[in-house]
Amino acid sequence: MLKYPIGIQTFEKIREDGFAYVDKTNLLYDLVEGGSYYFLGRPRRFGKSLLVSTLEAYFKGKKELFHGLAIENLEKDWESYPVLHFDLSKADFHERGKLDIILSTAIDSLEAEYGVKTPSVAPDVRFDVLIREVAAKTGKKVVVLVDEYDGPLVSLIDNEELLEENRAKLSGFYKNIKANDAYIKFAFLTGVTKFGHVNVFSALNNLLDISMDERFQCICGINEEELHINFDAGVDEMAKKQGISKEECYGKMKDMYDGYHFVAGGVGMYNPFSVLNALNSKNFGSYWFHTGTPTGLMLALRQTKQDISELNGKAVRSQSLENIFNYQTDIIPLLYQSGYLTIKGEDEDGYLVLGFPNGEVKDGFINQLLPLYSSFSDTDKDDLVRKLRRALRTGDLETFFEEMKAYLAGMYYEFFKNDEQTFQSVFYIIGSLLGNGTQPELHTNRGRIDLLIKTKDYIYIFEFKHDCSPEEALAQIHEKGYADQFKTDPRKKFLIGVNFDSKLRNIPDGGWKVEEL
């Protein structure tokens, strides 16, 4: 029976207690042999901590833990080195001074482990002395491992003052890695984001960023082959519980949890946290998303000028994804690095095309957005969606628009900085929430249908306009031939033109018109 390491990020515990382990040690060996200073960015819960723990066991020469793994036949020496491991993934850094406490506590532990003492109280100075003292006492160069280096920054996106304070402190702390090159064997930092060109990485410009390196695209996560090799029995058990075939189960796993790409045309990667939880519970669920979405990220998204409906299919230059310095005005790099968007391909101009990785991320992302626009609670949101679905199933457009108007009336006044874009974004989000049969922003060969909804008995084609007449919206549906593709469909078809009034910040009386085909 497979044992799934839910919440276990320690390589030693996984190996000693017989938990399932996807062997990445061939890539780990290539990493160590190929260089000395690295940075790897991956979304949260993607296996970064386990990778760091594996590196620690390797550099400490714990050969017995690697029995049967690829590296056993690659490494010949198994020499032990002193390891300075810092984990910034677990603390809440909203309290001023918390960063100093976390760093100092880690240094206290390392000093005790290696029998050295640093006289200063400042973490950056203590770290500098620690590297030199440990190297001198052991007679060997040290290995520096930092897990979630950006933890004290990412959690403070909504607190610019404290973020800047922590950024300055981390810059002073991390510069010791570069300054002590003569005493360092290997350094590896992981994080969700790359705060490039803003002090932290300027102090660490000797790091090789392998986040989008084709050679190491599979170093975290689970690819399709690894899923079949390591978890075929688990998928079989899950399929039996779900009452579906194993092939269907694999297909649903792929739809829900696969789809992360870190290079254009690269290997698709499954989110390991979601895969392990799904197989362990034998149920499909939104495991990754429910571990917590940064509030600051969602608030930044509400305030950005980015059209939500254009996120899926957004084309960007690869260089623009490397840092989040301008996240206040360009949220795309932050969404990519955080795992809400991924690389779906490359267009003919060489731009990377982004999109939601999979069903879990898209559904969770959209569900988080709607309450940000208004005072609606999660219960209110679910009630709204339920009423809208019922109205559409029965062809009751009067109720559909009355519910929409009630929701729009409750939206935050200050949110309407760009009226047309906001209106389109709200309908895109609601359309996405309506589920199967709903396609917001559907591209055709002659344009883009704002919202297409198909139920058992009806097809609805919506066109939304801003400070125009609903007749103009209907005219566009006809002009672009949006309904042509459904001519032979036996279902009843409704063409619906909708006007949004910027003064009312709502759909006015008579602001929608329906034409039945």
Image: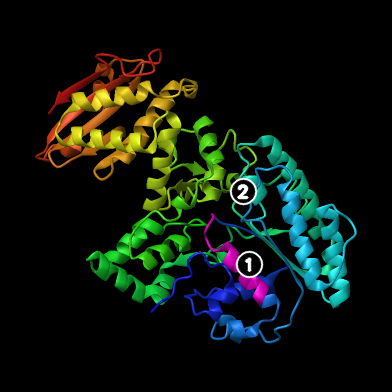
Q: Name the residue located 69 percent from the left edge and 81 percent from the top edge.
A: 61
Q: Provide the secondary structure element on which disc 2 rests.
A: loop
Q: Looking at the image, is 15 positioned above or below residue 48? A: below
Q: Which residue is mark 2?
A: 322
Mark 2 residue crowding within 10 angstroms, few (<14) / some (14–19) / many (20+): many
Q: Is residue 371 left or right of residue 199?
A: left
Q: Name the residue located 80 percent from the left edge and 69 percent from the top edge.
A: 112
- Of callouts 1 and 2, which one flags the residue occurring earlier in the amino acid sequence? 1
Eye-nearest disc, 1 or 2? 1
Where does residue 433 sit, x and y in percent of width and height?
A: 32, 40
Task: Name the quadrant containing residue 139.
Answer: bottom right
Q: Amino acid at mark 2?
A: Glu
Query: Could you tell me how many numbered marks the image carries?
Result: 2
Where does residue 242 sit, x and y in percent of width and height?
A: 25, 64
Q: Looking at the image, is 19 positioned above or below residue 356? A: below
| Magenta region | 43-57
Q: Is residue 42 left or right of residue 269?
A: right
* SS assignment for the magenta stretch, majority: helix
Q: Is residue 380 left or right of residue 343?
A: left
Q: Provide the secondary structure element on which disc 1 rests.
A: helix
Identity of the residue furthest to the left in this view: 490
Where does residue 44 sit, x and y in percent of width and height?
A: 54, 55
Task: Name the quadrant containing residue 402.
Answer: top left
Q: Name the residue located 34 percent from the left edge and 26 percent from the top edge.
A: 407
Q: Which mark is residue 52?
A: 1
Q: Amino acid at mark 1?
A: Val
